[in-house]
Amino acid sequence: MSDLSKQAGILSATEFFRFFIKTIIGIALARLITPSELGSYRQLFLIYSTFSTFLLLGIPQSILYFLPRCKNQQEQNKIISQTINVVSFLALGFAISIYLLRGLIADKFSNPNLDSLLLLYAIYPLFMFITQLYSSIMLGLKAPLRAAKFTVFAIFCDLFLILGVAYWTRNLYYIVWAVVASAFLQWLYARIKLWHYHRSQAPWDFSGFRVQLAYSIPLGLSSIIGMLSVQLDKFMISGFFSPEQFAVFSVGAMELPLIGILSNSVNSILLPHLSSGNPAEMGTLYSGAVRKNALIVFPITALFYLFAEPLMVFLYGAVYADAAIYFKIYLFALPLRIATYGIIFQAFGKTKIIMLNSLFVLIANFALNYLLILKMGMKGAALATVIVTWLSVIVYLVQMKSILKLKLKDYFPLEKIAKTLFVTMISSIIIIPVIRLIHIPLLSMFLGGVIFLMVYLLTGRWFGVILNYDLQTIVSLGKDILRSIDKRK
């Protein structure tokens, strides 16, 4: 494996680790505090993730473009310093806005408890904006290992502080204090590490920043539209239902983050090669990635669907059993993740299409969410999101054929995808009796998962879905991991 591939692998591994720890924290909080408190906790982060995307406007992403193009250290220091100053100012504005609007936000979320919580949580952006910037700066300086180390540090801050305080106090107010304390430690780490780049620059020198802003604003607008499309159903549920109901919905209404991490890892490697502009070569690379993704995504979708109810009860407790239905609905969008459709338009330089499609998704999602929530309740919100996701993919495919003039069969190996789906269905049907006969959730999931995997591997080999190349790749990756462990010893 090349050094770049290893570095990308390390970053992906740290993101998987972050996802794992966040899941552990979420599971622990579900068992340590009430559903109403968990709903309030999740609403705090919903507010932050939404409005931080608005305010940052793609500035962290712009760092990845401008820093590598600097001619010398002085230029790098200037860009870093300017960006830190601007982001700090935006963080202050965000903190003041939360403080002033906390009553209005609590009212719109039908959650009076948010008022006092937001009074404390208003400090959070002052720390987190800089910590979000740190990783982008390190990646822009081509120092991914530093970014990975910081991610690990942040993960352990959250793990020990949030879980520790939650376990000892079982009090949401103190847990929010722990969240802010963890953010402060991360901010302190980032400021110390960035001091070398920041200390020699004038604090109010913004000359040249307009160019960076001109680059970042389109990125930021696309991020805002994409983020709103993902979070829209949760905002609407917060407005229509109680914090307790929101907690149950938010536990189940999610796509599996590990699939997103997989897609991002594939994209980071695929995009530079797709940008060659050779349609035939692009088709070969893209279809190969789609086939491999299907081998992972289809069985994961089936397993999580079959074990949705016992999984929710096992992880979060019986009080969150109703979350399984929202989780199942969201899983119907997961098979689409065997491909990343926007990456083709990026490779052809047609980024405007991506933005327009995102805007279509946002508008359609809002209208359908509103209609289906009124008709079906919380199930309607989940169903609306899945329907709109399928519609957006159909629009992408039509545009690939009509605007880019591509032959879809060259990019999507339909026969191989169908075979993978068939093998997945056979494996699923075979383990259904195991699920029905064994009433101990953990035992049922373990035996069912093992049997599913064995049947999937055997039938996959029989039907030519799983190739020798796939097995050799897995063995090679395993050997690389073992070698790296031996070297560290």
Image (cartoon, grey):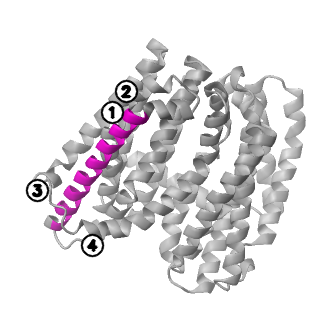
Q: Main secondary structure of the magenta part?
A: helix
Query: What residue lies at 39% left-to-right and 52% top-to-bottom?
Result: 55
The amino acid type found where label 1 is placed reads Ile
Q: Which residue is mark 1?
A: 123
Where residue 157 appears, as percent x and y from the top left, is: 37, 31
Contact (Cβ within 8 Å) of mark 3 with mark 1: no
The amino acid type found where label 3 is placed reads Ala
For residue 144, what is the image quadrant?
Answer: bottom left
Distance, label 1 to label 4, CA atoms, is 34 Å
Q: Which mark is residue 120?
A: 2
The amino acid type found where label 4 is placed reads Arg
Q: Helix, strand or loop at disc 3?
A: loop
Contact (Cβ within 8 Å) of mark 1 with mark 4: no
Q: Which mark is residue 202?
A: 3
Q: Helix, strand or loop at disc 4?
A: helix
Query: What residue lies at 44% left-to-right and 64% top-to-bottom?
Result: 219
